[in-house]
Image (spheres, rainbow, N blue to C red):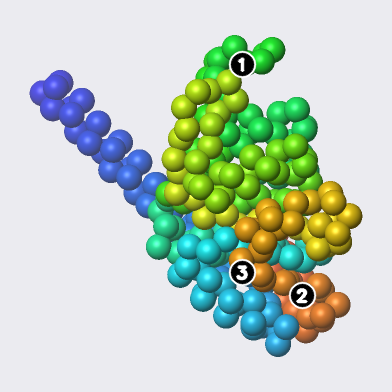
Amino acid sequence: IDEMKVAIKSALKSVALEKENRQLRSELGKAFSLENIVGNSPAMQPVFDMIKRVSQTKSNIMILGESGTGKELVAHAIHRHSAESSSPFVVINCAAVPEALFESELFGHKKGSFTGAVQDKTGIFEQADKGSLFLDEVGDIPLTVQVKLLRAIQQRVFRAVGGTEDKHVDVRIICATNKNLEEMVAKGTFREDLFYRLNVIQIRLPSLKERKEDIPLLAEFFLRKFALVMGKPIK
């Protein structure tokens, strides 16, 4: 009897966990679907159309727009609507990574390859294998790293810092920036060949002043969101 009780408790716990996982996956899918990108203004319709079309390709995508226009939401939506939606979606904010650690963040490192490398580390390229890698603020990638990133994108091959073996990956790159990369290319602060590798398909997000019709929708969306988070009734 005691063994049966333990077995039943274990089974009930497994069912509860499975149910919770299904619910979380459903909520995650909803959170990063087209429905979560708020707006029905004329300026947003081409964006929704483009998301549906490009999600069915494996081409690299460049998302342009001012800060706060929803570039990461669009990247998530593209991944969620792609054939690789169940594969990893890995995000890195390029502006937040120190230059000295950038190569290690992208490609990983081997233990002892530099001071502080006390164990092997898997880079984000390897983490995103078979899925999507979102490079946010791509204009902040140091020039010293850009050539290695170009090789990884062109040949789908990289080598960890301190490593001796090439690793092969199948990764779709989605990147975003609020900077004018063409100007940076002209000034020599961003590699032209890397720019064209990343800028295969371009999506430009309109600023709020270009979609004023969406302001009431956005206001209501955020009011409901934070009322729910804070447990406050909406008035």
Using the rendered image of the protein, determine whether residue 84 is visible from the camera's viewpoint: yes
Q: Say which label, 3 or 2, has the lower sequence index.
A: 3
Which residue in the structure is indicated by mark 1?
A: 113
Q: Distance between the residues labelled 3 and 1?
A: 37 Å
Q: Which residue shows up at 35% across the image and 41% down it?
A: 17
Measure the alpha-carbon separation of dots 2 and 1.
Answer: 44 Å
Label 1 Cα neighbours within 10 Å, binned few <14 / some 14-19 / many ≥20: some
Query: Where residue 126 appears, x then y in whole percent?
Result: 49, 38
Where is the N terminus found, in terms of image quarters?
top left
Amino acid residing under circle 3: Ile
Which residue of the protein is positioned furthest toward the left in this rendering? Answer: 1
Q: Which residue is drawn at 45% across and 43% down?
A: 169
Q: Where is residue 176 in the image (x, y as percent from the top left)?
A: 70, 58
Residue at the image point whose x is 54% and y is 41% from the top: 125
Q: Is mark 2 on a helix, strand or loop?
A: loop
Q: Mark 2 points at which residue?
A: 206
Residue located beneath label 3 in the image? 201
Q: Residue furthest bottom?
A: 42
Cβ–Cβ under 8 Å for marks 3 and 1 = no
Picture quadrant of residue 93:
top right
Q: Nearer the viewer, residue 78 or 34?
A: 78
134 versus 43 height, above or below = above
Counting from the top left corner in percent of width and height, residue 163 is at: 53, 23
Q: Is residue 85 left or right of residue 37?
A: left
Asked whether, in this view, residue 160 is left or right of residue 44, the answer is left
Q: Which of marks 3 and 2 is in front?
A: 3
The three-letter amino acid code for the residue at tag 1 is: Ser
Q: Is residue 227 above or below residue 207?
A: above
